[in-house]
Image (tube, rainbow, N blue to C red):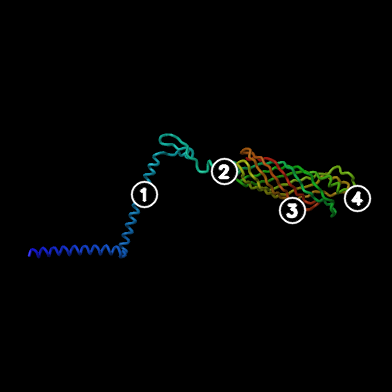
Amino acid sequence: MKVSIFLFIFLKLFLWVIQAFAQEYSSSSYDRYVPLTDRAFDLKVDNLRNQVSSYEERLRRSRIRWNQLFQSQFKFDEKNSTNEMNFVSGVKKKAQSRPGEDQKPENDNISSLQESLRNNYFLGFTVAAINSQETTLYDGMGGTLGEMEIDLGKGASVEFGRRLQSISFGVKYVISISDLSKDSWYQIETNRDYDDKVDYVSKGGQFFSQAVFLQLSYIQNLTPWIELDYGIGLGYSFNAMKDLPLAEEVNLPDYDMDYFVYNLGLGAKFKMSPKFSFCLSWKYFGTGGSEGSFDAVDAYLAEVGASYYF
């Protein structure tokens, strides 16, 4: 009887162990091979989010701690943060220069040049050698008197304007004087059919010109002290020929004519000081071919001068 009771208890325990093992195996197999329910999936996602948040919080604390340790080693002088670093011990050392400061000194010089001339008014003065082109004279009666060459002349100009960084604009006044060719007058005289011919031409006369321009220029920096000046201008010119050799004998008309003119120029400026610059330039004066008592005169100018900025 005792053996039967003991055997019954043993079998009961054995069946309980087998059942527990079967339940554990079936549960793990279900979790392993059967998809999770929506609720179980949400629980796992929330768990992962909590872990990520924990890692982020640890990282934030580590960063704060690192910054505290780093700032406790040295501190910057706020006024001279680009030039020197003050350590806690009191020893001063030069800080490393910013990238490009030592490598591009010319760009800094160019910037300082532009800054010194920015928004400044200027007054310029030049003297020039003028090569006026050949023109045709008319006799005032519908006929042609002859071709007239103009000798190399001289001129001067004054300009007032303002510079805005790489652009400048202003008003320019130009005056010039050139001698008319004696050879041209002699050729005209020998081709005349009048009885009162003159065998010798003692003078050729003079060509006077005045012009007022509105000037616009673009300035390009080459070096800290040298600039290129690309200029264009539009204006009006007053021109006259005086002291002509045949005026009394042939009763020539008044050789006075006014017309619109333009100019194109290329120049170089050399900065001598923050207020003063020296300049060389070449200009072409064009007219478009106006006609009157003589054809409009084109010219080339070589100028040298200076500008004062204020």
Question: Which three-letter amino acid code belongs to the residue tagged 3?
Answer: Gly
Side (left or right) of 85 relative to 53: right
Q: Which residue is denoted by mark 1 in the rendering?
A: 59
- Closer mark to the observer between disc 3 and disc 1: 1
Question: Which three-letter amino acid code belongs to the residue tagged 4?
Answer: Tyr
- Discs 3, 4 touching: Cβ within 8 Å: no
Badge 2 or badge 3: first in the primary sequence:
2
Question: Which three-letter amino acid code belongs to the residue tagged 1?
Answer: Leu
Q: Which residue is denoted by mark 4 in the rendering?
A: 194
Q: Residue at x 32, y 59 (%)?
A: 44
Question: Which three-letter amino acid code belongs to the residue tagged 2?
Answer: Asn
Q: Tag 3, which secondary structure?
A: loop
Q: Which mark is residue 288?
A: 3
Nearer to me, 278 or 292: 278
Badge 3 or badge 1: first in the primary sequence:
1
**Residue 26 point in image, percent of width and height:** 25, 64
- Closer mark to the observer between disc 4 and disc 1: 1
The answer to which image quadrant residue 8 occupies is: bottom left
Q: Tag 1, which secondary structure?
A: helix
Q: Give me the C-alpha separation between circle 4 and circle 2.
A: 71 Å
Farthest top residue? Answer: 90
Q: Which residue is denoted by mark 2 in the rendering?
A: 107
Q: Give me the C-alpha separation between circle 2 and circle 3.
A: 42 Å
Q: Give me the C-alpha separation between circle 3 and circle 4.
A: 34 Å
- Discs 4, 2 touching: Cβ within 8 Å: no
Q: Residue at x 22, y 62 (%)?
A: 21
Badge 1 or badge 2: first in the primary sequence:
1
Q: Give me the C-alpha separation between circle 1 and circle 2.
A: 43 Å
